[in-house]
Image (spheres, rainbow, N blue to C red):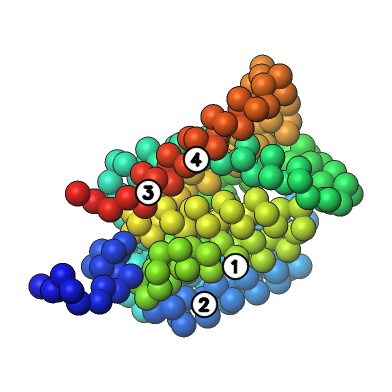
């Protein structure tokens, strides 16, 4: 048993004894997956490029973990249960962090052409198709790589905030988009906190899916009443969203009793 006066590592604060990859191996897997993500769309029909690229993010880490942890590969990927409080935090974050990010992004001089191109990409398929491609697929594939593999690996050897910041920065760089840089950085940081503290990628997947689904629905004008309320009460909406996101983070990082 550790003495109260002995130095405590990051793993004693926010990780369990379930398997996770070593940071160097995790970084190599992420780089290989990102390279595959860029190459695969060039090899398939344009209509399948988005889905194929997302699947590429999954195939590389799954194959690597099957080799490195053949006994418990799902746990090594973070595909394990988590305490209910982490799913409560995930819902709070997923439902509100998008609005905080949107208001922060308004402060930046974003290129209008890239914003318009992103909106066209989301508007092109059917609503169900857009949710599948831009909410469900990224929530599963991106979380498995950036949080299940990278964030959890870093969380075993680095302080919580440092591990989450590195994971968030890599996640933002992966998008290769000025328009998405700030939202993906801040969301990636929070989702990494969630995955490391829960030692599970499932709550982060829930938060990611909810976040993207709401953004897609609003971008496609599927929720006009909600959008109208946000437009009429921006200060109240920002205060409520910030409070809910902060509550989700507080639930995530608090030490167990």
Name the residue tied to disc 1: 170
Q: Tell me the residue at 37%/38% (across/down).
A: 88
Work out whether mark 1 precedes mark 2 in sequence or the reverse, and give the earlier one: 2
Q: How far apart, in angstroms, are the residues tagged by discs 1 and 2?
A: 10 Å
Q: How far apart, in angstroms, are the residues tagged by discs 2 and 3?
A: 25 Å
Is 218 left, or right, of 83 in this rendering?
Answer: right
User: Picture coordinates of residue 149 (x, y %)?
Assistant: 44, 67
Foreground disc of the pair 2, 3? 3
Q: Tell me the residue at 35%/57% (across/down).
A: 197
Q: Nearer the viewer, residue 19 or 70?
A: 19
Foreground disc of the pair 1, 3? 3
User: Picture coordinates of residue 75 (x, y %)?
Assistant: 31, 63
Contact (Cβ within 8 Å) of mark 4 with mark 1:
no
SS category of the residue bearing label 1: helix
Q: Nearer the viewer, residue 99 or 32?
A: 99
Circle 3 residues within 10 Å: few <14, some 14–19, many ≥20: many
Residue situated furthest front in the rendering: 5
Number of numbered markers: 4
Circle 2 residues within 10 Å: few <14, some 14–19, many ≥20: many
**As drawn, 136 above or below 19:** above
Contact (Cβ within 8 Å) of mark 1 with mark 2:
no
Name the residue tied to disc 4: 245
SS category of the residue bearing label 2: helix
SS category of the residue bearing label 3: helix
Q: Tell me the residue at 19%/49% (across/down).
A: 257
Name the residue tied to disc 3: 252
Work out whether mark 4 precedes mark 1 in sequence or the reverse, and give the earlier one: 1
**As drawn, 210 above or below 169:** above
Q: Quadrant of the N terminus?
A: bottom left
């Amino acid at each position: 048993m550790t003495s109260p006066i002995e130095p405590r590592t990051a793993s004693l604060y926010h990780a369990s004894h379930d398997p996770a990859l070593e940071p160097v191996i995790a970084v190599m897997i992420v780089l290989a997956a990102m390279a595959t993500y860029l190459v695969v769309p060039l090899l398939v029909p344009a209509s399948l490029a988005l889905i194929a690229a997302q699947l590429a993010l999954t195939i590389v880490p799954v194959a690597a973990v099957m080799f490195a942890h053949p006994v418990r590969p799902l746990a090594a990927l973070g595909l394990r249960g988590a305490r209910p409080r982490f799913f409560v935090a995930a819902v709070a974050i997923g439902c509100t962090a998008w609005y905080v990010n949107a208001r922060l992004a308004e402060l930046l001089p974003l290129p209008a052409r890239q914003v318009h191109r992103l909106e066209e990409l989301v508007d092109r398929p059917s609503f169900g198709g857009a949710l599948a491609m831009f909410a469900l697929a990224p929530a599963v594939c991106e979380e498995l790589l950036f949080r299940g593999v990278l964030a959890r690996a870093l969380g075993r050897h680095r302080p919580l905030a440092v591990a989450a910041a590195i994971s968030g920065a890599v996640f933002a760089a992966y998008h290769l988009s000025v328009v998405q840089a700030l939202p993906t950085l801040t969301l990636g940081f929070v989702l990494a906190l969630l995955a490391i503290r829960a030692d599970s990628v499932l709550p982060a997947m829930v938060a990611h899916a909810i976040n993207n689904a709401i953004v897609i629905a609003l971008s496609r004008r599927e929720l006009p009443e909600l959008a109208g309320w946000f437009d009429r009460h921006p200060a109240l909406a920002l205060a409520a969203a910030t409070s809910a996101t902060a509550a989700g983070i507080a639930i995530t990082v608090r030490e167990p009793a």
